[in-house]
Image: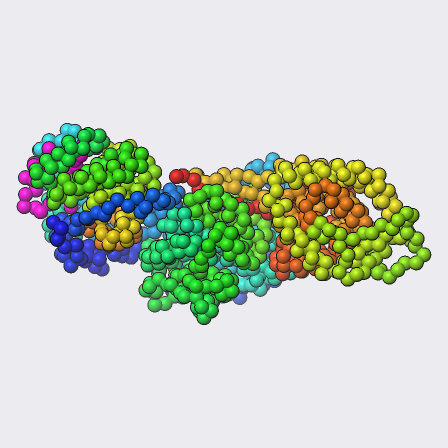
């Protein structure tokens, strides 16, 4: 050890190691772990080692969960669920409160254990992970208490299968378990194979407080165990992890009726405008990509910097990079710890090398890396063009790309030039500009002049291929609840559509009426040039176009061009919906006759008029919230339309079913491509004249008639459709085909569309995604 | 002393202390260096909060850094009831800030504080009491603490203090010039004070508690440096809020930016409100992280403090003996 005199020369920091005695004693007393099922630990099965990535030392052996283990855990959760759900909210709140208290009392123990298993710096585990974990359980104790008041009529999903990643092991556990339990669900959670230990310690805490058996079950293992959980008889799967695995899970659960939320990858923009506090933005980079070794799904990994300040910013960033300390995660002076596993380290190296090979230049800290263990010196890549793999793929390591933009428009264009949409960070002292950009970026979470700020009271989750669903806040607890289910009404499969002429089925009297596709506000002939006869009881009512995939393509393009609808005020949209109701009312008798002629209930018309009024009323009222999160922050939970939605309409109520789905979608600002009832599409195509006379901008509603299953499949496969509602087509097909761009799907059973189940806030909630915008304030 | 060499790390540690950095000659007023400066207060606060949680000092390192704080300390008395005898007592502590057994336990020879800081009428007494020690006497001047006196009287006060033997002058600025964004007036005033200081080093007290916003702090810092301040200093100790880490962060970033533009090195002195050994470590961590080790030497860094030394001495006694210490066993300042 150097002397005081020597240190006075160097003014070095010296080692400041966190003690591990208590945690090592705990590990030594256990050595091999079983699963935590039905309130007890099972005997260890076939085990694998979990290691300390900073040293490579094995820490413990954990069991590889088999399908039988998963089945036992799910059975225990299933058995426990009714009783857990039957507890009063207050009783569940006391359990969650007890969990929070016990974690708080073991805060340092869990921090140290997390560091050993994961490699993150002790400062982060101690100051960020654990406080957020504790806050999450307290917050959700509150939700349990007031659940019945805040979500009247809602029921828990049931048994939730939860699969979490290795980057924030205990925090992700908290994000999953706290809301599930608060809402009355029981859980089977699989921690990541690299980092199972804090979940097992959490299981011991559950046992310690005497949590009812089976409410929390922990099964350890690798991806095979996770796959077994996904296919097990659970009611909901909540997954946080890679987009690749998320897609597999989407396909595996397709058509099973399991609720699904996915928190996936990201390649989030970090936008620095010329008027930003550049030192603050540089520090933001430290908290973004140089946080948790860059192993953060919402890390600001694409630095987009105004050309006007890029030289200054880069100089400051490079200087700051030189101050980062890389090394022993247990040292209290360490900024960058160990990469979680050699596999990840190899992946980071590979992606950075590919980025360099594609023309980027790596600026890297000249850090002395420890001789052993998984370490990667932090840095950033300059000169990466949009197609560079380092710009496109999630590196999941402490390396960002740095590129420039010229104007705010270009910043948005670059920011959104990605398949992901998890978060964005915006740096500008101009609040007008910053909020404008916040509205324009595709991201579930937007941080203005800050980054990686979290709170249990605000929703977190992505758009696009970053997944769907939110964790935290009102929107997060809602994802663990089921709205009262409508009584399903069986719908007969539509008869096959026939493009051949139907002699002997005389059409109606008068001048022949032509139904066309309605695309971009214009009546269009179908691309294929075919039509099919719409008939009732052997009588031809008219011909409807037989739309094909190219018509869907054109409709989606038209819908994208109508983007202004999403920016219109709620009042403007309401005016259009009222006008639709007014013009439909003027033609009520004609529409009623048409329905009657087709054998449908003429009351659909009056109901549609009322429904248009109801959604017009909601258009400027279904607004977001301001979450109570941290002091001196406003956290705005904005309702944002999906953008372009596909809607496959029920066959049973050709007018009202169409209206019940299309109206809430457009009331909230979406543009839709709707496939009307195949057996009676004329009820919908008749409407386009109403739309035309009601000032509905072209492209907001597009109607493509034809084979509903084929057209819905094309919509599901379309990468530029953000969400798909489907009533009728095979749910398995819809959900599996939607995995391509991980579009949000809502598969609705047919129902009595006249009743309350045909209308309501649930429809509106499915028509929007929540964007949480964080704005710290102070001069 | 324009040719005084910059501090080098080759100087024996315990003798380092008083050699000041070369004077900052200043530059013409350039408002474009700061008039569009962006300082985001929540971000500055966040950085300030995490500075001390990102770094930790233990054992010998902690002891060394506390000793360094003493080397960089302007041991201060600025009270209405100051007498020559009280100043003599303070000077005695400045000469021997740590008890012998602590020095011995730390393996250190004699050491002393960076300076002693007093009112102008106490300078002569301080100079006498510090004779032969090499410890410079710093005097506040220019109508400390409010500075609301005619400029000629304020300049005369500087001349008086220098004549009495002060080697460092801690001036206060006219806050009104900052609040009214009258940068030319502020520049001219400080430049005149700089000239009046002659060979003495000048520390410009910005009274940041009165300036309120971090943008004001940055702008005032930059004008003071352009006008030739050798140090920029946070506070008189008499404002409602004195040295804080976010304000200090803003000031050291300003002096870093000034250095980047001019190649000139300016020192930083937080003052007021820092009472604990923990504070001493926090501000040193700020200096090392934002500027580098050169700003941990008394030539470029001073801590303006009165009661902090007692806490440091107790912590160092604990380091040496392993027992928690009582101030009653240590000589008071």
Return the x and y of residue A51 as percentages of the image width and height. 43, 63
Instruction: Name the residue furthest right.
Output: A504
Based on the picture, tell me whether residue B120 belongs to the magenta stretch: yes
Residue at image location 84% in from the left, 60% down from the top: A498
Q: Is residue A741 visible?
A: yes
- The quarter holding residue A303 reads bottom left
- The quarter holding residue B214 reads top left
Return the x and y of residue A253 as percentages of the image width and height. 65, 58
Q: Nearer the viewer, residue A314 or B82?
A: A314
Q: Is residue A394 above or below residue A655?
A: below
Return the x and y of residue B123 as percentages of the image width and height. 10, 37
Give the extent of the magenta segment. B114-143
Horizontal side of residue B192 vs A127, given as left or right: left
Residue at image location 11% in from the left, 47% down from the top: B100
Q: Is residue A301 visible?
A: no
Return the x and y of residue A443 as percentages of the image width and height. 54, 51
């Amino acid at each position: 050890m150097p002397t005081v005199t020597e240190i006075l020369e160097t003014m070095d920091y010296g080692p400041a190691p966190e003690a591990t005695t208590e945690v090592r004693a705990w590990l030594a007393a256990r050595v091999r772990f079983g699963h935590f099922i039905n309130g007890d630990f099972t005997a260890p099965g076939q085990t694998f080692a979990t290691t300390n990535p900073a040293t490579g030392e094995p820490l413990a052996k954990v069991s590889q969960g088999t399908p039988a283990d998963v089945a036992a855990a799910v059975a225990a959760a299933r058995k426990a669920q009714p009783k857990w759900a039957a507890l009063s909210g207050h009783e569940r709140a006391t359990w969650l409160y007890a969990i929070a208290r016990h974690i708080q009392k073991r805060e340092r123990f869990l921090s140290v254990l997390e560091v050993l298993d994961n490699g993150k710096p002790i400062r982060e585990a101690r100051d960020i992970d654990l406080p957020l974990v504790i806050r999450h359980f307290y917050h959700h104790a509150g939700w349990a208490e007031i659940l019945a008041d805040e979500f009247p009529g809602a029921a828990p999903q049931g048994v939730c299968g939860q699969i979490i990643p290795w980057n924030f092991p205990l925090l992700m556990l908290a994000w999953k378990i706290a809301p599930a339990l608060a809402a009355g669900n029981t859980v089977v959670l699989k921690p990541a194979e690299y980092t199972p230990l804090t979940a097992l310690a959490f299981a011991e805490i559950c046992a310690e407080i005497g949590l009812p058996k089976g409410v929390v079950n922990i099964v350890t293992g690798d991806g095979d165990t996770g796959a077994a959980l996904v296919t097990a008889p659970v009611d909901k799967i909540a997954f946080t992890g890679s987009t690749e695995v998320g897609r597999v899970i989407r396909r595996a659960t397709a058509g099973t009726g399991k609720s699904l939320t996915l928190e996936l990858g990201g390649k989030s923009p970090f936008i620095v405008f010329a008027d930003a506090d550049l030192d603050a933005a540089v520090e933001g980079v430290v908290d973004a990509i140089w946080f948790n070794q860059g192993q953060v799904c919402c890390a600001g990994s694409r630095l987009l910097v105004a050309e006007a300040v890029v030289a200054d910013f880069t100089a400051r960033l490079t200087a700051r990079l030189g101050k980062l300390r890389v090394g022993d995660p247990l040292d209290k002076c360490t900024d960058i710890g160990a990469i979680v596993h050699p596999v990840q380290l190899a992946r980071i190296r590979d992606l950075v090398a590919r980025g360099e090979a594609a023309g980027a230049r790596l600026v890297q800290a000249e850090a002395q890396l420890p001789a052993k263990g998984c370490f990667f010196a932090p840095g950033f890549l300059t000169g990466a063009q949009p197609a560079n793999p380092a710009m496109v793929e999630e590196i999941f390591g402490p390396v960002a790309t740095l590129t420039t933009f010229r104007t705010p428009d270009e910043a948005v264009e670059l920011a959104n030039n990605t398949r992901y949409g998890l978060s964005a960070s915006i740096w500008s002292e101009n609040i007008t500009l910053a909020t404008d950009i916040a509205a324009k970026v595709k991201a579930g979470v937007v941080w203005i002049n800050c980054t990686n700020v979290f709170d249990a009271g605000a929703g977190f989750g992505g758009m696009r291929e970053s997944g769907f669903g939110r964790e935290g806040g009102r929107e997060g607890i809602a994802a663990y609840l089921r709205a009262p289910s409508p009584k399903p009404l069986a719908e007969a499969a539509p008869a096959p559509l026939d493009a051949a002429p139907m002699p002997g089925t005389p059409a109606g009297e008068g001048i022949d009426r032509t139904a066309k596709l309605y695309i971009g506000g214009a009546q269009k002939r179908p691309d294929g040039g075919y039509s099919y006869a719409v008939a009732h009881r052997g009588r031809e009512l008219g011909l409807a176009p037989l739309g094909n995939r190219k018509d869907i393509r054109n409709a989606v393009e038209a819908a994208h061009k109508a983007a202004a609808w999403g920016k219109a005020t709620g009042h403007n949209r309401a005016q259009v919906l009222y006008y639709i109701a007014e013009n439909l009312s003027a033609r009520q008798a004609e529409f009623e006759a048409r329905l009657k002629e087709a054998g449908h209930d003429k009351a659909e018309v009056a109901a549609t008029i009322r429904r248009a009024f109801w959604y017009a009323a909601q258009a400027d009222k279904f607004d977001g919230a301001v979450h109570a999160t941290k002091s001196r922050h406003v956290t705005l939970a904005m309702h944002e339309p999906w953008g372009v939605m596909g809607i496959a309409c029920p066959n049973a109520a050709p007018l009202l079913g169409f209206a019940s789905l299309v109206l809430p979608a457009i009331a909230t600002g979406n543009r839709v491509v709707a496939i009307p009832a195949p057996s009676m599409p004329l009820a919908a195509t008749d409407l386009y004249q109403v739309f035309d006379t009601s000032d509905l901008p072209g492209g907001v509603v597009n109607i493509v008639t034809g084979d509903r299953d084929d057209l819905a499949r094309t919509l599901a496969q379309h990468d530029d459709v953000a969400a798909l509602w489907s009533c009728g087509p095979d749910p398995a097909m819809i959900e599996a085909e939607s995995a391509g761009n991980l579009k949000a799907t809502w598969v609705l059973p047919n129902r009595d569309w006249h009743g309350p189940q045909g209308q309501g806030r649930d429809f509106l909630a499915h028509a929007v995604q929540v964007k949480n915008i964080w704005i710290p304030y102070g001069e | 002393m324009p040719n005084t060499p910059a501090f080098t790390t080759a100087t024996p540690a315990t003798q380092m202390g008083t050699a000041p950095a070369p004077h900052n000659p200043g530059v013409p007023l350039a408002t474009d260096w700061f008039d569009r400066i962006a300082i985001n207060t929540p971000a500055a606060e966040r950085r300030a909060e995490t500075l001390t949680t990102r770094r930790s000092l233990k054992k010998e390192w902690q002891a060394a850094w506390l000793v360094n704080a003493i080397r960089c300390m302007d041991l201060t008395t600025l009270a209405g009831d100051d007498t020559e005898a009280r100043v003599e007592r303070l000077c005695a502590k400045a000469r021997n800030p740590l008890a012998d057994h602590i020095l011995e336990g730390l393996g250190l020879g004699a050491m002393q504080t960076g300076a002693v800081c007093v009112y102008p009428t106490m300078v002569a007494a301080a100079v006498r009491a510090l004779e032969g020690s090499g410890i410079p006497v710093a005097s506040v001047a220019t109508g400390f603490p409010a500075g609301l006196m005619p400029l000629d009287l304020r300049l005369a006060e500087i001349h008086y203090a220098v004549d009495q033997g002060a080697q460092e002058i801690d001036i206060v600025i006219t806050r009104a010039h900052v609040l009214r964004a009258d940068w030319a007036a502020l520049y001219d005033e400080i430049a005149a004070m700089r000239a009046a200081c002659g060979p003495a080093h000048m520390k410009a007290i910005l009274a940041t508690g009165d300036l309120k916003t971090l943008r004001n702090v940055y702008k005032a810092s930059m004008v003071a440096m352009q006008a030739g301040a050798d140090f920029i200093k946070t506070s008189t100790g008499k404002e409602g809020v004195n040295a804080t880490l976010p304000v200090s962060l803003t000031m050291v970033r300003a002096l870093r930016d000034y250095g980047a533009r001019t190649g000139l090195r300016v020192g930083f002195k937080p003052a007021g409100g820092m009472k604990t050994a923990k504070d001493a470590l926090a501000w040193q961590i700020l200096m090392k992280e934002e500027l580098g080790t050169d700003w941990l030497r008394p030539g470029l860094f001073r801590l303006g403090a009165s009661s902090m030394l007692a806490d440091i001495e107790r912590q160092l006694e604990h380091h040496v003996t392993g027992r928690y210490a009582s101030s009653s066993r240590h000589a008071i300042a």
